[in-house]
Image (spheres, rainbow, N blue to C red):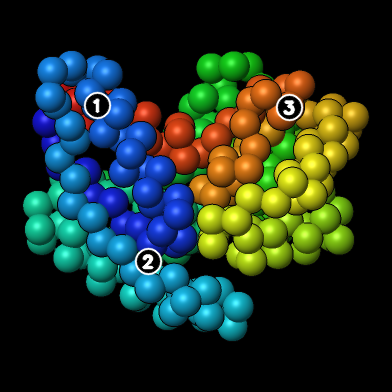
Amino acid sequence: MKTIGLLGGMSWESTVTYYTRINELMNETLGGLHSAKIKLASVDFEEIERCQAANEWEKSGEILGKEAQRLEQAGADFLVICTNTMHKVVPQIADYLTIPILHIADATIAELQVKGIKKVALLGTKYTMTQDFYKKRLINSGMEVWIPNEAEIDTMNQIIFEELCHGKIVSESKAMFVSVIEEAIAAGAEGVILGCTEIGLLIQQADAAIPVFDTTEIHSQKAVEQALAE
């Protein structure tokens, strides 16, 4: 079994889900008392979020790159970054490593392709929804990407940072996300990506009439597969 390096804390709420699901999936696969071999680095999200807000992506990439390097030095065989948004700085993080990074968008694209999805709604932070680092990978894989309007993007971003990152589940916020998903369906979306690792705390498959792709769950599944691959 390979050792998984988890780079988390962004937010710690979703990192808990990663740790739990990876161990559950490993045990489901191997049985007995098996659990995953994990090295975990959890950063101070306040520091990272300030970099996001100030457009200081290079600074955040340096912080995460150094943490990732420590994980490799501690024995991690590959890296899982427990957040969608900070995959923006994957190229910078990779410069600090000799081990591979399991990219969350690539893992999600593989699942979308299995389901034959051609047009997908992408929900996440404002950075993930509006910038190219995530959407471009989807588009380059042959998919059409739908995102909400500007006002909805701002509201979703606020819900993520002010509620979900604090573990707060608000029924009105859930209704807002469901309404946006219904808009996406009306616009022809065949699936919806929960492109922020906290959204799965709020939205599940039962809340949507189209397939829901929870990136935290998908990323965790792929991490277990890679840990057990020959």
Residue 127 can be seen, yes or no:
no
Q: Is residue 111 left or right of residue 149?
A: left
Between circles 3 and 2, the one closer to the viewer is 3
- Which residue is tagged 2? 92
Specify which label sits upstream in the sequence, 3 or 2.
Answer: 2
The span from disc 2 to disc 1 (Cα, nearest Å) is 30 Å
Residue depicted at x 19% and y 35%? 36
Q: Is the residue 184 above or below the residue 29 in the image?
A: below
Name the residue type under label 1. Answer: Met
Residue 41 place in picture, x, y as percent: 25, 61
Q: Is residue 159 left or right of residue 73?
A: right
Q: Nearer the viewer, residue 141 or 202?
A: 202
For the image, the number of numbered tags is 3
- Tag 3 and tag 2, C-beta contact below 8 Å: no
- Which residue is tagged 3? 208
Q: Quadrant of residue 229?
A: top left
Specify which label sits upstream in the sequence, 3 or 1.
Answer: 1
Q: Is residue 215 left or right of residue 43?
A: right
Secondary element under disc 3, as helix, strand or loop, is loop
Name the residue type under label 2. Answer: Gln
Residue 154 place in picture, x, y as percent: 77, 63
Residue depicted at x 52% and y 74%? 49
